[in-house]
Image: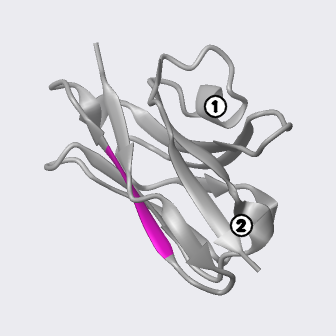
């Protein structure tokens, strides 16, 4: 069992930065691929980024490439999403996700665990 708790959301002006954190409970954190998703008002949940259990592989949504960076610290059971040059269209609730299969996170198919989300609001 893995529990995920996101933090770091808030209100920021366009062009600003935020770093989201996702703290995971459980001794098996390092086995899981970890991802970030987002859901804007009135829209479906959208994949943002994923990192493999070792940190050696990452995949990003095209629209965040070069602006967002996903990383993890297995010693701290934490995954991060550094978001730079934020745009109003990045406004959403951001969710952390964990799954043993990297591809499951990318395609949001049967993801094992979800956090409750943290709100990011980017003003223009």
Of all residues, the one furthest to the bottom in this rendering is 15
User: From what the image shows, is residue 107 above or below residue 118?
Assistant: above
Sequence order check, earlier mark of 2 and 1: 2
Residue 39 lies left or right of residue 104; in this view the side is: right
Task: Please give the range of residues in magenta.
Answer: 18-22
Of circles 2 and 1, which is in front?
2
- Residue 52: image quadrant is top left
User: What residue is pinned by disc 2?
Assistant: 64
Residue visible at 45% across and 39% down?
A: 34
Residue visible at 58% across and 84% down?
A: 16
Location of the N terminus (image quadrant): top left
Residue 37 lies left or right of residue 26; in this view the side is: right
- Residue 21: image quadrant is bottom left
Q: CA distance from mark 2 to mark 1?
A: 19 Å
Residue 111 screen position, x and y as percent: 56, 20
Nearer the observer, 34 or 96: 96
User: What residue is pinned by disc 1?
Assistant: 103
Residue 9 screen position, x and y as percent: 47, 58
- Residue 100: image quadrant is top left
Asked which secondary structure carries label 1, the reply is: helix
User: From what the image shows, is residue 86 above or below residue 104?
Assistant: below
Residue visible at 80% across and 64% down?
A: 89
Of all residues, the one furthest to the right in this rendering is 42
Magenta-colored stretch includes residue 92: no
Residue 42 screen position, x and y as percent: 85, 37
User: From what the image shows, is residue 50 above or below residue 86?
Assistant: above
Residue visible at 62% across and 14% down?
A: 110
Magenta-colored stretch includes residue 19: yes
User: From what the image shows, is residue 112 above or below residue 84?
Assistant: above
């Amino acid at each position: 069992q893995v529990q995920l708790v996101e933090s770091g959301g808030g209100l920021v002006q366009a062009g600003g930065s935020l770093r989201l954190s996702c703290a995971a409970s459980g001794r098996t954190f390092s086995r899981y691929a970890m991802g970030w998703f987002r859901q804007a008002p009135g829209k479906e949940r959208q994949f943002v980024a994923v990192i493999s259990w070792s940190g050696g592989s990452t995949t990003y949504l095209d629209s965040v490439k070069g602006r967002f960076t996903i990383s993890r610290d297995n010693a701290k059971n934490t995954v991060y999403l550094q978001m730079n040059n934020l745009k109003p269209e990045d406004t959403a609730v951001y969710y952390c996700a964990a799954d043993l299969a990297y591809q499951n996170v990318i395609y949001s198919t049967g993801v094992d665990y979800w956090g409750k989300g943290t709100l990011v609001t980017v003003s223009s």
